[in-house]
Image (tube, grey):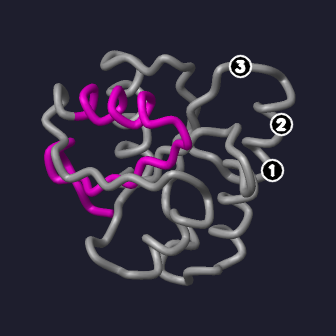
Amino acid sequence: MALTSLQQLEILVVDDEPFAQKLVGRVLATLGINSVAFADHGEAAIETLETGTPIFDLVISDIEMPGMDGFELVRKIRFGVVPAYKNIPVLMLTGKNTNENARSGRIHKISGYVEKPANAQDLEREIRLILDAVNG
């Protein structure tokens, strides 16, 4: 990902709560990010990644979802279920910023965390850190 601005990003947001999807979408729009797709759960996210259109630069996923949770989604991505996305940056949304989440984040190579409800300042900070790491 050789992107320099937030406006260029293609983002997949994965959350089982419609309200949370709308909130994150609105917050991203305030940052100038308008190319956002949504998936209701991990399985739908994998299906969306498999379609290949658009080509996503970042996944923002809730941790706690029925069926495939956020950590399982990242595990499948990292194991190459969709080979083109094996190394995609993943930003996790969490209602609980715990030591267990931090440990799981390191294991799964998660790029960052934002506590729910997500606000523009926190999302922008974490996304810019991810851009810097990827472009650095």
Q: Does the magenta segment cover residue 65?
A: no
- Pointer 2 residue: 103
What residue would you read off at disc 1?
A: 107
User: Could you tell me which quadrant the N terminus lies in?
Assistant: bottom left
Residue at the image position 72 percent from the left and 47 percent from the top: 66
Q: Earlier in the sequence, mark 3 or mark 1?
A: 3
Give the residues drawn in magenta, as a range: 1-28
Say what secondary structure mark 3 lies in.
loop
Q: Is residue 85 left or right of residue 51?
A: right
Residue drawn at 38 percent across, 25 percent down: 125
Asked if the magenta segment contains residue 3, the reply would be yes
- The amino acid sitting under disc 2 is Arg
> Dot 2 surroundings within 10 Å: few (below 14), some, or many (20 or more)?
few
Packing grade of label 3 (10 A; few <14, some 14-19, many >=20) is few
> Where does residue 127 sit, x and y in percent of width and height?
38, 37
x and y percentages locating residue 81 in the rendered image: 64, 80
* Mark 3, residue position: 97
Residue name at image x 52 percent, y 35 percent? 17
> Measuring 51% from the left and 51% from the top, which residue is drawn there?
40
Residues tagged 1 and 2 counted as in contact (Cβ below 8 A): yes
Which is nearer the eye, 47 or 10? 47
